[in-house]
Image (spheres, grey):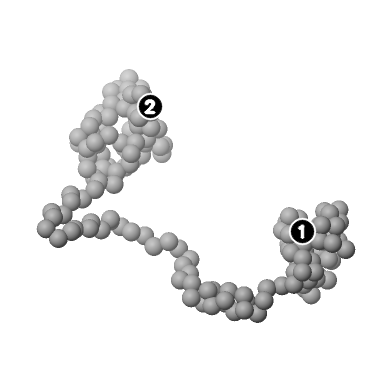
Amino acid sequence: MTTMTSTAALQRLTMQELRVRYAELFGEATSAKNRTWLLRRVAWRLQALAEGDLSERARQRAAELANDADLRTTVPRVKEPVPVVLEGSQPAAPVCRSDSRLPMPGTILTRDYKGQTLQVEVLAEGFAYAGQSYKSLSAVAKAVTGAHCNGFHFFRCALAGRGGAA
């Protein structure tokens, strides 16, 4: 039986029959419920048995690579970009990492809400509204409406780059 014929035959098997075939080939039961995964595993095993598995040299190399790998479960966080200063040059000014939807600090965001005109000043670190400072635009929107809502949406900042009012 060729691999191609086996693959076509595998497609016609029920899930229970695939599980039985898996147990025959791998010597252990599976609790997998993903048909595609089972088909691929069984087809791979049939191919490996028919045409040969990895050579011992390839297995050793794979083991070496796995042992040498610097495996991480989470990506390291970088708080601030580290400026690179070349000899004889001046260090660059720190880059402001603000949201691209926001205008420059000093800009006044205006919004009509329930007959009132709201004015929020964009600061370098936060926002100013009605004599108070807020960390986020959503916090300003909550102070105005009394309910949590998306500050960018409430003040229509996402529309600013597309010709909308900000």
Q: Which residue is drawn at 35% across and 24% down?
A: 163
Q: Label 2: which residue? A: 162
Query: Marks 2 and 1, Cα distance to the nearest angstrom?
Result: 48 Å
Q: Label 1 is placed on what type of residue?
A: Leu
Q: Residue at x 31, y 36 (%)?
A: 102
In the rendering, which numbered label is found on residue 27?
none
Please name whichever residue, 150 or 142, is drawn nearer the observer in this view of the structure. Answer: 150
Q: Which residue is drawn at 48% across and 69% down?
A: 71
Mark 2 or mark 1, which has the lower sequence index? Answer: 1
Where residue 3 sits: x, y (%)? 81, 61
Q: Which residue is drawn at 22% across and 58% down?
A: 84
Q: Residue furthest top?
A: 115
Q: Label 2 is placed on what type of residue?
A: Arg
Please name whichever residue, 108 or 96, is drawn nearer the observer in this view of the structure. Answer: 96
Q: Is mark 1 on a helix, strand or loop?
A: helix
Is there any visible trace of residue 114 in the rendered image? yes
Please name whichever residue, 166 or 147, is drawn nearer the observer in this view of the structure. Answer: 166
In the rendering, which numbered label is found on residue 39?
1
Neighbor class of circle 2 (other Cα within 10 Å; few <14, some 14-19, many 20+) is: few
Q: Compared with residue 63, is residue 146 higher up or lower down, i.e. above or below?
A: above
Task: Report the side of 155 relative to 53 (left or right).
Answer: left
Quadrant in which the N terminus is drawn: bottom right
Quadrant in which the C terminus is drawn: top left
Task: Report the side of 78 relative to 105 (left or right).
Answer: right
Q: Is mark 2 on a helix, strand or loop?
A: helix
Task: Report the side of 47 relative to 98 (left or right).
Answer: right
Where residue 136 sits: x, y (%)? 31, 42
Is there any visible trace of residue 16 in the rendered image? no
